[in-house]
Structures are given as structure tokens and as C-alpha cells.
Amino acid sequence: MNNSTRRALDIALATQARGMYAGLLSNEEKQRIGQSRSAQEMLSTLTRSDAWHDAALMMQSGELTDARFSDAISRCIFADFEKLYRFANDMSRQFLDFISMDVELRAIMRALRRLISPPVQETENAELSPVFRDLPGHSLERLRRAKTYDEVVAAVSGGIYEKPLAALKLDEKTGLPSLSDALLGLEAGFFDALSGYVKAGYDGPERKELEAAVSFRADMLNISYVMRLRRFNTPPDKIGTLLLPLHGSVTDDVERQVLQAGSDAEAFEVLRATKSGKWLPEDGADSPEGAIRAAQIAYFRKLLHTKLNLASVYAFLTLKEYEGEMLRRMFVALNYGLSPAEFMD
């Protein structure tokens, strides 16, 4: 298949993704959910939403627990992914496979949390699409059943997470790694593999757009890490071991300047001078996490509405995941008697 044919197929796929994006929540619907006084009232609004209708239906019977709602949201995201995956050409599927590897990363972290602090309530059901079950090098079911760290490592043998897990330092008493080290190691492994594929393995059209989107995601993740490290007065010479090795415009030097800044406001000034950091809102110093979410949403919305290509599909799936995270936050707030509007951003 030549690039001209691939481009035509990717445009068709991106057009489908853009149409699915139109079904995400409108500002009016978000405001209505923000004013909800109960989980049931929130679900009533979601029932009328194209993107989240099925999630609301799953909650019509049974307890309105945070775990069940999180599972329902995940299923909606997975369903959209599967629709796009099955419509994609072989080259595009290779890129989209990495999204299923992100699902695996979360499954590994759930398994580790269960081993470190049992019992941990599962928030996602194992009944996933074959798209998430049948990739080589991992087994989500084996991760769910794993009772030791060795069994966790064996469950991902041959996949991109085998080496990161094997490289983690284990506690002598428990035989387990720290959760923070595990998350950083796994995310570094994921982005290294994804970046390597986009740069060397993907030979389809619009590779530069995909590479830019992947670098932006890595930059945003490193910004979130470095802003957290500021809270603990982490010395700048430690960033090499505490941040992702993959960089876009947020380089080691930028990260050192952020750690050395006298305040969060000054740190954000340094970040906004970079290509990725320019997406951060001006008032971001008041809420670093909210600023990073806003930057990613703004970036991927623009990406989705510019050129139609595989990067548009990546943008839609990212935006749907972000909206799902927002709904999870708002649902939990309602169950704790808090205002969901405060957790919208």
C-alpha cells in the first residue's frame, strides 16, 4: 500500500474521529452536570449525550459506586477506540496499538497497588475487547491474577514493559518496587517505545505531525513531574533520574530552570517560553495540574480541527480520555457531597 492510499484511508479515519468528537459534551452540558445535586441527576444528563449515553445506561441498575462509574466510562472509551481501530489500515493500527499498551500500563499499576496494599478494589472489569486482550507480549488476565512481582513481570514478558519492570529497584523486605518508581519507569518505557516507533518504524504519511503530538504529550507529563518536584525542593541535579528521558521542547536545561525558579509563577514563565509550554494558560501558577490539563485540551482540540490525518485520531482519543477523567472527578465529588463544578477543570 503506497502513501497516497494510506493518506486517503487516514483522512477517512480522521473524518470519522472528528464526527465522534462532535458527540462529546457541549459547554452547556458540562455546566448542567456541574450543577447536578446527585449522581442520578448527573447520569440523567449523560443519558442524553452521544458520547456517554452507554456509560449512563450501564449505571441504571446496581449501586452508584465510583468504581462502577469508572468502569462504565472506560468501556465507552474502549468502544470508540475499537470502532476506529477496526476501520484503520494496517500501518495506522500499528500506531494505535500503543494506546492499548497504555491500557496495559494501567493494568500493571493496578496489579502492583494490589500487591503493595491489599485489598485494592478493582476499578475496571477484565471483559475488554480482543483489541486489548490479544496483543503479543502481555496478558491482562494474568496481570489480574498475579500474586507476586515475578508473576507481574512474567505477564508482560516479550512486551515493552518487561525491561522497565526488570530494572526497578525492589524493597528487600517486600520484594516490590515503590509505586512512584514503577509509574515513572513504565511511562518512560511507553514513551520511548512510542517515540522510537514514530521516528523509525512508522513510514506512513504525516509522520511529523504524529511525532510532534507524541513529543507534546511527553513534555506535558514532564512538566507535571517537575512541578511536583518543586514542592519537595528537589535539587536540579536529580532531574535525570526523576523525569522522562523523552523530550520535545522542554529540555533538561528548561527543567533545571523550573526547579531553580523562585516561585511557581516564575517556573511557568520559563515553561511558556518553550514550544510546548506556550499552550499553558496565563493563570496556570495557581493550579499547575489544571493548567497542564487545559494546555493539553487546547493543543489536541487545535490538532483535531486542522489537517485530517492519523494525528487527528490520536487527538480525539486523547480528548475523550480527558473528558472521561473529568466525569470521574465530578462523579466522585457528588458521592462525597461536594460541588462537581469545582472539579470540572
Image (spheres, rainbow, N blue to C red):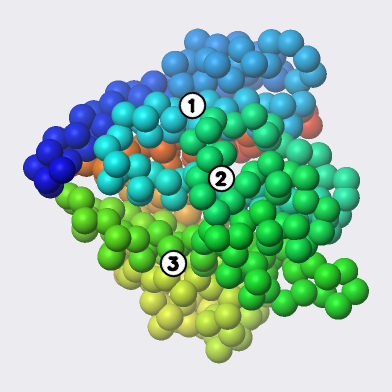
Residue 4 appears at what percent x and percent y? 9, 42
Name the quadrant containing residue 283. bottom left
Q: CA distance from mark 1 to mark 3?
A: 27 Å
Figure label count: 3
Name the quadrant containing residue 198. bottom left
Q: Which residue is mark 1?
A: 79
Quarter of the image with the N terminus in it: top left
Residue type at mark 2 is: Val
**Residue, x 44% and y 30% (percent of image)?**
82
Q: Which residue is mark 3?
A: 192
- The first of marks 1 and 3 along the sequence is 1
Residue type at mark 3 is: Asp
Residue 287 appears at what percent x and percent y? 55, 55
- Label 3: few (<14), some or many (≥20) within 10 Å? some
In the displayed structure image, the side of residue 2 where residue 43 appears, left or right: right
- The first of marks 3 and 2 along the sequence is 2
- The first of marks 1 and 2 along the sequence is 1
In the displayed structure image, the side of residue 39 where residue 17 appears, left or right: left
Question: SS of the residue at dot 2?
Answer: helix
Q: Is residue 341 visible?
A: no
- Label 1: few (<14), some or many (≥20) within 10 Å? some
**Residue, x 78% and y 51% (percent of image)?**
146
Residue type at mark 1 is: Ala
Q: Nearer the viewer, residue 15 or 25?
A: 15
Question: SS of the residue at dot 1?
Answer: helix
Question: SS of the residue at dot 3?
Answer: helix
Q: CA distance from mark 1 to mark 2?
A: 13 Å
**Residue, x 75% and y 58% (percent of image)?**
151
In the displayed structure image, the side of residue 296 where residue 305 appears, left or right: left
Q: Which residue is mark 2?
A: 103
- Label 2: few (<14), some or many (≥20) within 10 Å? some
**Residue, x 63% and y 47% (percent of image)?**
139
